[in-house]
Image (cartoon, grey):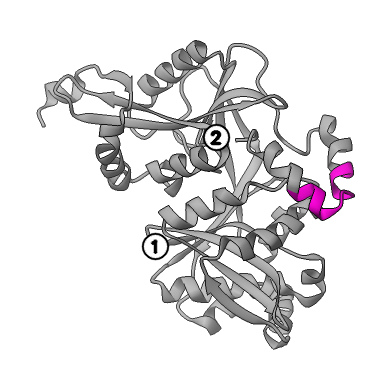
Amino acid sequence: MTAPLLRAPVGVRRARPSDRARIEAFVRAHPGATPFHLPAWGEAVEAACGQRAITLMAERANGTLAGVLPMTHVRSPLFGRALVSCGFAVDGGALGEAEALASGASALAATLGCPSVELRGGAAPAGWAVDAATYVGFARDLAGDDEAQLLAIPRKQRAEVRKALAADLTIDIHADADVHHRVYAESVRNLGTPVFPRALFRAVLATMDADVLTVRHRGRAVASVLSLYWRGTVHPYWGGGTREARELRANDRMYVALMAHARARGCTRFDFGRSKAGTGAAAFKKNWGFEPRPLAYATWSAGAPRVVNPLDPRYALMVRTWRRLPLPLANAVGPWISRGLG
């Protein structure tokens, strides 16, 4: 491609269904892409949660694709409206031509009546507010074998893992969204947050490189994690355990088993995902020897941006109340609420 074409301005437009293959090829070739940038992610969210997937494309004058920005148009009577990249994900943002795509996103937000645009990762557009203090991410390389992996865990946590390895626990690798959802639903209810729709797990398992690892105690599922696989990295994305999981050390068994499973699949890196800074979840990951790195999220706002952080003081009463709900009631109401979180 000639230098004049590289310097030529780009136009931004909404993608059409016929653009899907081009977008997927661009994402798979882009060094900054994540599994959440894939069209399949937005499609799974739209099918399961009813939140519209919209992708903006940046094109040069000759039709060459220069950038993409996958977004979810989130609408909720409880949490408001926003354009989010990427919806229900911990990463996102523009791939290529960030300024042009960001300008297109803010213009689209105004057209759709959304007071804000949220970019979870990627380049921060000029003039947008950036939050690099709320969330931290945890990722590191996997060791070469099981014993080396065990030795890579700090001593205190390694002792807990050894106890978990000696316990009466079995591992099951599968793609059964129902088994996973039962465990995950109890886990998030105990934390005070609504569970995602079961259909979201089914859609992700059906359309992306993903699987479920479940820990069982005497046949009963007590911990389970749905993981994504992308470019040699395993992303344990939705995971949790029942109340008895802690005493059984089932979560410890789950993650050390996932490390071995991912290595057998050819993975060389383990992305423990994001946690809110200063929380117990962040401390748990640090205990495994993972160092936190700040995650920068950028927001454009033409009004009051929505707030969906459960640690916000205005949600404290809701969280305490949710923890006390009977599980069947939480599972019935939770998906209706959570589909609006984005």
Drawn side of residue 329 relative to residue 143, left or right: right
Relative to 108, does residue 161 appear above or below in the rendering? below
Q: Amino acid at mark 2?
A: Gly
Q: In the image, which residues are magenta?
A: 320-331
Relative to 159, does residue 205 appear above or below in the rendering? above
Frontmost residue, 14 versus 35: 14
Q: Amino acid at mark 1?
A: Gly
Relative to 288, does residue 70 appear above or below in the rendering? above
| Prevailing secondary structure class for the magenta stretch in the rendered image | helix
* Residue 270 in sight from this viewpoint: yes
Frontmost residue, 286 versus 180: 180
Frontmost residue, 157 versus 56: 56
Q: Position of residue 205 (x, y in %)?
A: 48, 57
Q: Residues within 10 Å of mark 1 (few under 14, many from 20)?
A: some
Q: Position of residue 179 (x, y in %)?
A: 63, 65
Q: Badge 1 is on which residue?
A: 232
Q: Badge 2 is on which residue?
A: 50
User: In terms of secondary structure, where does tag 2 sit?
Assistant: loop
